[in-house]
Image (cartoon, rainbow, N blue to C red):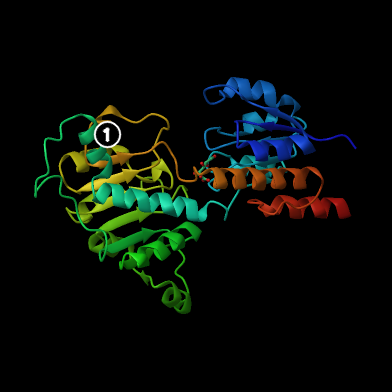
C-alpha cells in the first residue's frame, strides 16, 4: 500500500517531523512566515491528511480545495481555527492534541501571574535600558502572589493544573465553569465554585482557561473589568478574543486593574501599539505550549491522529465523533 500524502502547515520539532516523514509522503510548509490562505488552497489539493496549527484558518473553502482530504489533525488542543461544522458536513474527522500540553501551559500561566504581579518584564526592561541607578526600598513594588485569591475561569485540564500549582503558593482558589465539578472532586482539588460575577469581585488574580466559543468571545469586557478589584491581575493564556483587548487597554491605562499578563491576542500576531506602550502588561508571543518536550509530544500526537484516520482506524482525539459513527453506519449498509 502506498504511503498517504500529508501536508504539514509549519515546521515542528525534528523527531516528530521524522516520525511523520517515515510513515507518509510528507510535504511541509517551510516559509519564514505563516502560510497564506491562497498558498494553502494551492498546496492542499494533493493532501489526504492536513496538519494545521493555530495560525491556519481551515474553512470549508480549504476543505473543498482538497478533494482527497480524509482528516484534519490539528497541532494544538484549541481548534477554533477549524470550522468543525463544515468538516462534519463533509464527513471529515477533526482531531486535536489534548493532555500533552496541560502542564506546560499551566507553567506558562503561572509565569504570567508572577511576571505581572512582581513586574518581572518591566524590571528586565529597566535594567537593560541602563535606567537603574541603585536599589531603593520603594522601587518597583509589585504585589505578593502567595496567599492571594486566584479566580480560575474554565476548570478543564489546564485550569486544574494551574490549581495544583497555586496550592504551592498557599492561594485560595475560586473557579467558574459552565459545568460545576462534583463536590468530592472540588474537595480533592481544593477549589470552590463561584458565580462568574462573584469570582470577578473576589479574586486578586483572574486567569482564563476556557475554550474560545461564541459564548466566551469577549467574556471579559468593560463591565467585567469594572467588577474586578483595582489591584487585580488578569491573565489570559487561552485565546485572545475571550478578552476585549480594547477594553482591557483602557482599564490598564486608567489603572482600573493593576496589571495583566497576555500570551494570546485578538488578531495574532497583531498587538495594538496602545497595549504595547503600557508598562503594566506582560506580552508574550503565544508561548503556552512552547517547550521542546511538549511541542514534540504535540507533533507526535497530531501525527498519530492523522495516520490512524488515514489507515481507517478511529483516531484517539476525535473532536467530531459523529463523523466516525456515520461512517460506520454507512459501511454497514
Ligand atoms: C499551540 C495552543 O501552540 O494547543 C493550543 O491550543 O494554543 C498552543 O499550545 C498552538 O495551538 C499551536 O497550533
How far across and how far down the image is residue 176, in percent? Answer: 38, 63
Q: Is residue 304 left or right of residue 227?
A: right
- The image quarter containing residue 24 is top right
How far across and how far down the image is residue 180, in percent? Answer: 44, 69
Residue under the image location 26 percent in, 61 percent down: 203
Above or below for 103 versus 265: below
Disc 1 designates what residue? 275
Q: Nearer the viewer, residue 147 or 6?
A: 147
Q: Quadrant of the N terminus?
A: top right
Q: Is residue 145 left or right of residue 239?
A: left
Q: Nearer the viewer, residue 18 or 225?
A: 18
Q: Is residue 117 left or right of residue 263?
A: left
Above or below for 280 versus 181: above
Q: Nearer the viewer, residue 217 or 5?
A: 5
Residue under the image location 34 percent in, 31 percent down: 271
How far across and how far down the image is residue 172, in percent? Answer: 30, 68
- The image quarter containing residue 243 is top left
Residue under the image location 36 percent in, 66 percent down: 168
Residue under the image location 15 percent in, 31 percent down: 131
How far across and how far down the image is residue 129, in percent? Answer: 21, 29
Which residue, as the protein is rendered here, is positioned at the far front?
134
- The image quarter containing residue 239 is top left
Amino acid at each position: 500500500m502506498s504511503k498517504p500524502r500529508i501536508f504539514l502547515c509549519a515546521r515542528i520539532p525534528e523527531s516528530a517531523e521524522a516520525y511523520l516523514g517515515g510513515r507518509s509522503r510528507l510535504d511541509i510548509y517551510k516559509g519564514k512566515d505563516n502560510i497564506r490562505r491562497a498558498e494553502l488552497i494551492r498546496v492542499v489539493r494533493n493532501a489526504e491528511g492536513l496538519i494545521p496549527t493555530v495560525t491556519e484558518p481551515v474553512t470549508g473553502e480549504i476543505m473543498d480545495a482538497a478533494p482527497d482530504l480524509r482528516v484534519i489533525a490539528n497541532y494544538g488542543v484549541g481548534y477554533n481555527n477549524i470550522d468543525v461544522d463544515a468538516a462534519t458536513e463533509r464527513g471529515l474527522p477533526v482531531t486535536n492534541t489534548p493532555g500533552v500540553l496541560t502542564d506546560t501551559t499551566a507553567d506558562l500561566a503561572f509565569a504570567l501571574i508572577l511576571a505581572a504581579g512582581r513586574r518581572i518584564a518591566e524590571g528586565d526592561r529597566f535594567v537593560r535600558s541602563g535606567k537603574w541607578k541603585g536599589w531603593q526600598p520603594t522601587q518597583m513594588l509589585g504585589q505578593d502572589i502567595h496567599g492571594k485569591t486566584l479566580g480560575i475561569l474554565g476548570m478543564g485540564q489546564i485550569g486544574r493544573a494551574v490549581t495544583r500549582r497555586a496550592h504551592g503558593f498557599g492561594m485560595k482558589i475560586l473557579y467558574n465553569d459552565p459545568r460545576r465539578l462534583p463536590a468530592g472532586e472540588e474537595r480533592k482539588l481544593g477549589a470552590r465554585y463561584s458565580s462568574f460575577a462573584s469570582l470577578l469581585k473576589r479574586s486578586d488574580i483572574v486567569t482564563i482557561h476556557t475554550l474560545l466559543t461564541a459564548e466566551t468571545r469577549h467574556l471579559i469586557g468593560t463591565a467585567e473589568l469594572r467588577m474586578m478589584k483595582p489591584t487585580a491581575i488578569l491573565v489570559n493564556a487561552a485565546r485572545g478574543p475571550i478578552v476585549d483587548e480594547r477594553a482591557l487597554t483602557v482599564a490598564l491605562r486608567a489603572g482600573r486593574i493593576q496589571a495583566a499578563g497576555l500570551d494570546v491576542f485578538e488578531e495574532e500576531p497583531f498587538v495594538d501599539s496602545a497595549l504595547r506602550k503600557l508598562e503594566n502588561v506582560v506580552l508574550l508571543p503565544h508561548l503556552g505550549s512552547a517547550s521542546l518536550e511538549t511541542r514534540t509530544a504535540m507533533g507526535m500526537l497530531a501525527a498519530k491522529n492523522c495516520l490512524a484516520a488515514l489507515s481507517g482506524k478511529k483516531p484517539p482525539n476525535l473532536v467530531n465523533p459523529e463523523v466516525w459513527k456515520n461512517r460506520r453506519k454507512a459501511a454497514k449498509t
